Image (cartoon, rainbow, N blue to C red):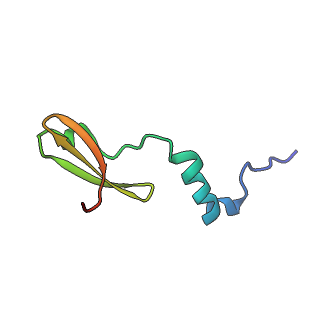
Amino acid sequence: TSLKPHLDPVDYCSPAVFERELTQVFSESWHLVGTTRSLRKSGDYLTAEVIGVPVIVRNFDGTLVALRNVCA
C-alpha cells in the first residue's frame, strides 16, 4: 500500500492556497506579538505585523491595548 499525502506539493507554495489559509485558518486565531515583559511600564509599546496587518500594542497605565498601526 502507498500513502497518499494530504496535500499536493504545489499546495506548499501556491499563492491561492496561502490566501485561503490566511482567511480560513489564521484570521480567526489569536497571535502572539510579544510578552508582558516587553510592556512593563506605562507608555511601553511594541509593533508587529499580523497576517499583513500592522499592529501596535501599548501599555496605557497598566492596561494593554492593541490597535491597528495607522496614521490618524
Which residue: 12% across, 46% down? 43
| Residue farthest to the front, as pictured | 72
Which residue: 29% across, 57% down? 69
| Residue farthest to the right, as pictured | 1
Q: Foreground residue, 55 or 12?
A: 55
Relative height, residue 17 to residue 1 (above, below) = below
Q: Foreground residue, 69 or 10?
A: 69
State the count of labels.
Answer: 0
Q: Foreground residue, 28 or 13?
A: 28
Quarter of the image where the C terminus is located:
bottom left
- Where does residue 28 sit, x and y in percent of width and height? 50, 42
- Where does residue 67 sit, x and y in percent of width and height? 30, 49
- Where does residue 33 sit, x and y in percent of width and height? 33, 47
Quarter of the image where the N terminus is located:
top right
Corner quadrant of residue 19: bottom right
* 18 sits to left or right of 59: right
Corner quadrant of residue 15: bottom right
- Where does residue 44 sit, x and y in percent of width and height? 15, 46
* 51 sits to left or right of 65: right
Which residue: 57% across, 46% down? 25
* 27 sits to left or right of 72: right
Which residue: 27% across, 54% down? 47
Relative height, residue 53 to residue 57 (above, below) = below
* 27 sits to left or right of 56: right
| Residue farthest to the top, as pictured | 62
